[in-house]
Image: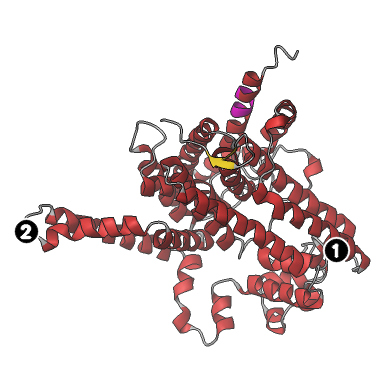
Amino acid sequence: MSTWLTLDRLEKYLKTMWGIVLFTLPVTSFRWLPEVMGTTEVRPLAFYPLLLLGPALLVYLWRTRKNFRWPVQTTPLVVFLMVVMISTLLGGLYAPLDLRGHNYWEWALRAWLSLGIGMGFFWVAVLLSRSEEFFRSSLKWMYASLAVTIVWGVIQALAIHTPLLDFDSVNAVQLSFSIRGMVDKRISGFTFEPSWLADQIVIFYFPWLFAALLTGFRLTKFRWLEPALLLGSLGTLLMTYSRSGIIGLLLSVLVVLLTVGRGILVAIWSWFWAPLVSTEIKGKWNRLLIILIVIALLAAAFWWLSREEYFASIWQFANQDSLIDYVTSIYAAPRLAYIVGGFKIFNLHPWFGVGLGGSSFYLFDNLPNWALVDPYEIARQVSPDSTVMPNVRNLLVRLLSETGIVGFWMYMAFMLSILGTVRRMFLSRKQVMVYASVAGLAILLSVLIRQLTLSTLTSPTIWISLGAVVGYAHHIMDVPSKTGAVVQKEESED
């Protein structure tokens, strides 16, 4: 058997199964997962190929164990998991009262299952991002899944906004694989809701396409591929009307351009103004045409977003009397109330928090007074007839309330270690490494921005994206020499 199961065959199998994981990642709420997964909305189809990949990966790691090196960037993450374990045990000692038929240990187990699924995607991504060949193969599968996502998004948009396609027929296809159908006025792709589709674009796809645009890196000989997919992803993002997604993308792009992209901005500025300040250089009208096209695209995007009150309400702050009124008008009052409640829980248990998942049992008692008059979500959840368990709605505040200042700073140390890795890759000056570093910076920023309005620890989109950056930097950039020193591996030829 060992003769048949060679390392070469194992690598081919791993590469194929990992590609299938990436290709099926857009399906986030797969209907046909076993009931052991519970009633959670996060039900990734990619969990199936991940399970098929796991045993082969363990065999591969065992047979190559002499070459295995622990990724130093993940040390804070391991410490974080240890702190979470301590916090969970301490949280049980507080003995919170049962809430809506759930007890603390049951909810803690669900939280750990959620975290375990996320960690599974992360570690597989770290261990498989082990060569430039694997890296390029992964990008091809990602591009393919993005193309299918864009096509399905266009089909949904035609069914929602035009009479060209029947809404009920397209919705029936959606329900054949998803636990939730299409959403009125907004496309959700293969995901549970539009904001999840926006997360996939902003965190999982766009950073690699944007980095390719900035660095000139191309995966194939078709140089139009990355720009075409980038435009398609932006169009899909607009059709989600996701405020967190669009604002997160704008902020991450701005930071990337002002940090690692300043040279490109200067070059674009010089190229643009050259024919306008010198009569010897032609192309003035081409530059003016570009300005008109950009203005037209921005105006069209603004008009499109203004059609939906859910999005347009964010720039109507002048009509509100107070900050609370404004937050309520943009449908963010419940989210802010839960965040305030999370901070109050943290103040009561500052060091190790109330245990993973434990914040749900304390939130109602720590909501601000102004939130109790909210006629919508909070009023429904506070009602004795509700069966919904509340959550903080902000991962960073959730970590503060559930793992305390110790767990929070371990998690932030993990994020800072990724930032340091990104910086080292950028300073290598090799095109493929610079490309990965720019994408990594955009991913890290997008993840942190999104976690201000997202509290889940399961998201495969987030964990695979972070794992790919950590794994690629670990396996490719640092290669131990015979003397034990760390040297940089020469870039392979395209």
Q: Earlier in the sequence, mark 1 or mark 2?
A: 1
Residue shown at the point (49%, 54%) measured from the top left: 442
The crowd level at tag 2 (other Cα within 10 Å; few <14, some 14-19, many 20+) is few
Q: Nearer the viewer, residue 185 or 332?
A: 332
Q: As shown in the figure, which amino acid type bears the numbered disc 2?
A: Thr
Q: Which mark is residue 279?
A: 2
Query: CA–CA distance between discs 1 and 2?
Result: 75 Å
Is residue 13 highlighted in magenta?
yes
Q: Is residue 64 left or right of residue 287?
A: right
Color scheme of the displayed model: secondary structure
Q: As shown in the figure, which amino acid type bears the numbered disc 1?
A: Arg
The image shows residue 466, relative to residue 172, as above or below, that is below
Q: Which mark is residue 100?
A: 1
Q: Which percent across, then down, holds residue 480? A: 61, 38
Which quadrant holds the C terminus? top left
Q: Which percent across, then down, holds residue 207? A: 47, 49
Q: Quadrant of residue 318?
A: bottom left
Q: Main secondary structure of the magenta part?
A: helix
Which quadrant holds the N terminus? top right
Q: Which residues are magenta?
A: 12-16
Q: Which percent across, then down, holds residue 302? A: 37, 64
Dot 1 falls on a residue whose secondary structure is loop
Q: How many marks?
A: 2
Q: Quadrant of residue 444?
A: bottom right
Q: Which mark is residue 187?
A: none
